[in-house]
Amino acid sequence: MARIQAIYSYTRRFGSYYNNTQEIYTKENHYKTDNVSLIVNKSGNVKTLSEGIKKLRLQLNQLTRNNVWTIAVFENPANYAHFDPIRPEYLHEFDKYGENSVMHRIVKREDLIDTYQSFYGCNIKLTESYIEVGSKIKIRTLYYPIYNKKHLDALLAIDIKNDFIVESLNKYNKNHFSIINMNKKNNIYTLKELLPCSQLSPINLGINLFSVFKMMLFPAFLLSLISTYLKHYLIKKRYAMQRDQMTNFYRRDYYEKKLLKQRNFNLLIIDIDHFKKINDNYGHETGDDVIRHVAKRINNCIRSKDVPVRWGGEEFILSFDDMNHQQLQIKAKKICQSIASFPILNLTITVSIGGISTKNRHFNAVYKAADKALYYSKNNGRNQYTII
């Protein structure tokens, strides 16, 4: 899961590269720089993305063990597109694109409309594995829409061979002398989880009975040791699938389904003020460190039974039991003061908070109300809380 989250992180960074890349007037034609092809259907200003696409492929190949199949950047409207490499399957589809067709054909289908509102949550989509028509390669496609001023400017599509997940597990088994598989049948223990930002076809991690019998050929002590290790590994793996690696808070895709079943809420939404400026001025590594420090200070302000969730990039949700409106205000004030009390990495960091204490309401309505309170805090100067 950590490797997939790293793939998402590098993919999102391409959006900043795209937005800051210069445009050059280019005539209608087919161009090629190294392995990156540029198809211009209509003469006009064209972004020079070849170097950025090459760098993105280099980073993703390191994470996927050279299993990146294709990287494509589609413009909206479809006056031009970049392909690394160009293949008949993509070229055939691109010829059909027209005004807003990227939105209609892919973004709507993959439920990626208006993802700029998600505060870096699942504003990216990893499809389920499928056999690509023509190439017959089993792949997953990663879609990332690039928005500016609420307009979809481009769509980044990355095809990754599905083998990279299997190869990662095989390498782990080899290095740790384990027998974990991804089969669905004949397992005496199976752990089933969705990949981050994926909605169907969960992966299966299990221990096969036949594999255990083979291991029994070894001395009993060795078998006992391996069995204990595997059980410990699967427990840790389950924990890792529930928790965000950076903050140790619950992951949104794990805990949101629990929130949807609740009806009584004492809820806070916390957002780091001016976080985009931190990333722009000091880089994403510093931004990640700020998130880690803020999460630690939040954790120091809450009880062990309270529920912290990393909802998006710099947005957190806290859910409390046994609280009333006044107690929720006190908690929000304590968190605000804790984070603003002294600098983080020599930077003045503050947060804005919106919250709600209510009963017999659906989570979607509760979240909407708390989010409105959060924006009230932001619009009134930040570094404050609003509880309704």
Image (cartoon, rainbow, N blue to C red):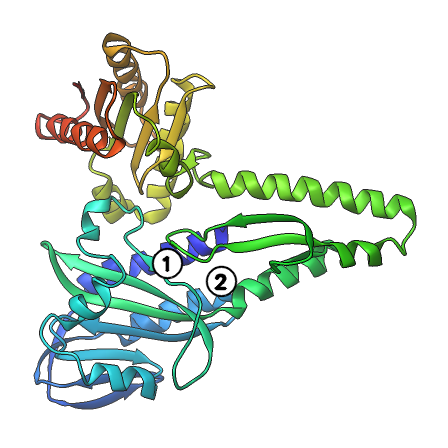
Q: Residue furthest right?
A: 219
> Where residue 10 is drawn, which disc sits there?
1
Q: Residue at x 68, y 53 (%)?
A: 187
Q: Nearer the viewer, residue 250 or 181?
A: 181
Relative to residue 124, is residue 387 depicted above or below? Answer: above
Measuring 47% from the left and 41% from the top, which residue is drawn there? 245
312 versus 134 height, above or below: above
The numbered mark at residue 238 is: none
Badge 2: few (under 14), some or many (20 or more) residues near its Cα, within 10 Å? Answer: some
User: In the rendered image, is residue 65 in sight?
Assistant: no
Disc 2: which residue:
63
Q: Position of residue 247 (x, y in %)?
A: 43, 35
Give, as a three-letter code, the residue at label 2: Leu
In the image, 200 versus 318, the foreground residue is: 200
Note whether 357 is above or below 313 in the view shown: above
Element type where label 1 sits in the image: helix
Q: Position of residue 134 (x, y in %)?
A: 39, 86
